[in-house]
Amino acid sequence: MSRHHAPLPAASAELFRQASSCLAEALATGQPGRRYAAAHLAALRCAAAVLAVRARPTDRRSQPIRSAWVLLSRVAPELAEWAAFFASGAGKRAAAEAGLPHAVSQRDADDLIRAVLAFRSLCQAAARAAGASGASGAVAAGVAAAGGLPPGAGTAGWAVRATAG
């Protein structure tokens, strides 16, 4: 049985292609720092793809520019835990890009690649849902149905929101 997906909105399709290219680079290199940096950049491209279909420009010149992770948390709250996860790795990415020895281990890089693969799927579902309906509720439902929690969510250091039933 074949699964049919709605097409990705044009605003996000190129960003997902760029994310896939970054992931391919991460998988092709054996250097942990380069693997980690490329995977983190892929996650950033995925976040940008969701922002492309969900974010709305504002005319508030007094507000400072926020990181993509902060913006993602605001426009797609269902991806907030993922945004926090990837934001927490920005320092490691910077150290890896700077070429600092031992900035990240092979395990760190491998774990991040696996996380980005899961995040990319959730972001694609979110972009498709937003493109198809324009409603954020559909995005939240799509992410929830995909089991969208980042690695470590629900363990020490990660808040999990419980819903009253």
Image: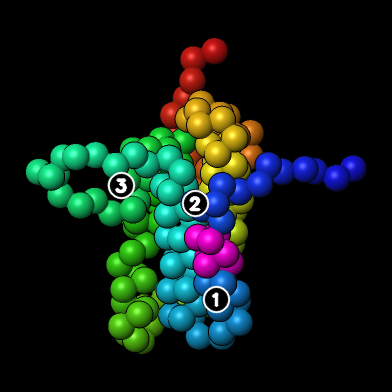
- Is residue 58 something that shows in the picture? yes
Q: Farthest residue toward the left?
A: 62
- Do callouts 1 and 2 mark residues in contact (Cβ within 8 Å)? no
Of the image marks 1 and 2, the number of the one nearer the N terminus: 2
Distance from label 3 to label 1 (Cα)?
A: 25 Å
Vertical comparison of 12 with 89: above or below: above
Q: Residues within 10 Å of mark 3 (few under 14, many from 20)?
A: some
Q: Which residue is mark 2?
A: 11
Q: Return the residue at label 1.
A: 26
Q: Residue at x 38, y 82 (%)?
A: 102
Quarter of the image holding residue 90?
bottom left
Element under label 3?
Answer: helix
The image quadrant that residue 24 belongs to is bottom right
Q: Is residue 79 above or below residue 43?
A: above
Please name the predominant secondary structure of the magenta segment in the image: helix
Task: Tell whether position 60 is magenta.
Answer: no
Residue at 30 percent across and 67 percent down: it is 91
Residue 36: % across, % down = 46, 73
Tell me if residue 136 comes above or below residue 124 in the rendering. Answer: above
Which residue of the protein is positioned furthest toward the top in this rendering? 165
Q: Marks 3 and 1: CB-CB under 8 Å?
A: no
91 to 1, vertically: above or below: below
Q: What residue is disc 3 on?
A: 70
Secondary element under disc 1, as helix, strand or loop, is helix
Q: Amino acid at mark 3?
A: Val
- Where residue 128 appears, as percent x and y from the top left, is 59, 42
Per the image, label 2 sits on a secondary structure element best described as helix
